Image (cartoon, rainbow, N blue to C red):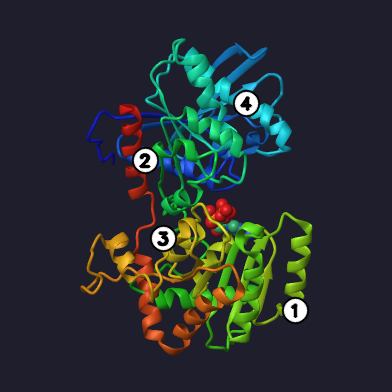
Amino acid sequence: VAKGPKSPPLYICHVAVEMAPIAKVGGLGDVVTALSRAVQEHGHHAEIILPRYDFLLASPLLQGTTFETEMDWGGCKNFVTTCIVEGVRVFFIEPSNGMFKVGSVYSTPSEDEGKFEFFCKSALEFLLQTGRQPDIIHCHDWSSATTARAYWQDYHHYGLWKPKVVFTIHNLEFGAGAIGDAAMNAQKFTTVSPSYAGEVGGHPSVNPHIGKFSGIINGIDTDIWDPMDDQFLPIPYCSENTVEGKEAARNALRDRLGLRKDRDCPVIGVVSRLTSQKGIHLIKHAAYRTIDRGGQFVLLGSAPDPKIQADFNDLAHQLGGDMGAFFYAYDEPLSHLIYAGCDMILVPSMFEPCGLTQMIAMRYGAVPVVRQTGGLRDTVFDVDHDRERAAWEIHGSDDYTKEGMDGTNGFSFEGTDEGSLDYALNRAIDCWYNDREFFHKLQSRVMTQDWSWNKPSLDYIELYYSAIKG
Ligand code: ADP
């Protein structure tokens, strides 16, 4: 049921090269879909323009696709088809030059540059030729950065007059030059957490435009991540029966991975891409430390770099067995069971624009153990050190001593070395061994915290209105 906007409803059009679940590579694809859905729940209208990749043909979600229009542009015919995906109207642009006859969203950087530039401009052409006038064109990362400049240069004075441009940086590691250009041409630009906004504020692509820059945390999709309704778990559970639900999941996880079941010990998990961003030296160290301390360690991840993967294969040889399980694949069903079955989830990233893993972990009552950086800092509050900050951020209260105002939800550390990680991991493990009652309460508490799109979508809507006001 639409909640009804306070001001006139907005028409937001995303120009993006990813969208979950049909063309998802990373968090960008999740944000485009979930944010569109969430703003629609508040009574606004969202549309997404996406390239018509060849691989989409196989998707059952695109069964209802219909023809929308065709346009002569860019030296070829461009066909536009449309359907509703996850409740959102999507337009697919397919140039007859075969540019998007590809098996995956991204290929080589030089190829991607050309084809995404073409896509960005063809999206504007589509809006112009069909007489659409969105209030906001929302672009994402370097791949749709061209839209911002092309709009103001070639479209704004030629019929597509109404939109303002909002640009979101999901990761500044890629295409910083293009991002700087888009930032210059956007009325507002954002990144995916307030702390990451602070961390990249000095970057030459960002700094000149800092006055219109802010951070809004991502949410998680609470329909997909729902321990009360999750086909991959043995029994449904919530904050009322966390211990029972997690115990059933822990046993299922141990069965699945061949971990022994006769030990009363903490189970610590990692679900991650294995790249330097994610703190691979700390993940390896944590595997040794956990098993040293009598715990069980579960790793689900894969490394695009064969050298890093070889290193992790060694780790599996050393530690794999009935106390350590190493699963090198992308396996979403298994990830659900890991979040549910683990007592703690470790996220020791070197940098993290937002991070979803820690929020999913909390939704499943797994206590996050994280490095304090970017979005991890904005969502995880250390039980020993962040009580004041947690009371404020979670409950809006400046008195953390009041009943029910404890919003702390995890363990964190600052440095990038093994000693720093140990500081947080050891406290978490000690807490599990020495004060089980406290640990269980903590697990129930993290499950009640709201990491959905409820709040972030309202922040985006406010931002959209402020972009329109100028
Ligand atoms: P990033 O986008 O940088 O990879 P995030 O924390 O924002 O990091 O999102 C990671 C998402 O990918 C989470 O939903 C996590 O569960 C999922 N994920 C990562 N690795 C795997 C894997 N090997 N198998 C299944 N899911 C994975």
Q: CA distance from mark 2 to mark 3?
A: 18 Å
Answer whether labels 3 and 1 touch (C-beta < 8 Å): no
* Residue corresponding to mark 4: 117
Amino acid type at mark 1: Gln
* Residue corresponding to mark 2: 460
Residue at 64%, 75% in the rendered image: 285
* Residue corresponding to mark 1: 318
Question: Relative to the observer, which residue lies in front, 417 or 347?
Answer: 417
* Mark 1 Cβ and ligand 1 under 8 Å apart: no
Residue 415 % position (x, y): 54, 69
Element carrying mark 2: helix
Element carrying mark 4: helix
Query: Can residue 409 be spotted in the picture?
Result: yes
Answer whether labels 2 and 4 touch (C-beta < 8 Å): no
Q: Is residue 450 left or right of residue 420?
A: left
Q: CA distance from mark 2 to mark 4?
A: 26 Å
Q: Residues within 10 Å of mark 2 (few under 14, many from 20)?
A: some
Query: Does residue 29 lie above or below 450 as drawn?
Result: above
Element carrying mark 3: helix
* Residue corresponding to mark 3: 379
Q: Is residue 79 left or right of residue 373?
A: right
Nearer the N terminus, badge 2 or badge 3?
A: 3
Residue 461 % position (x, y): 33, 38
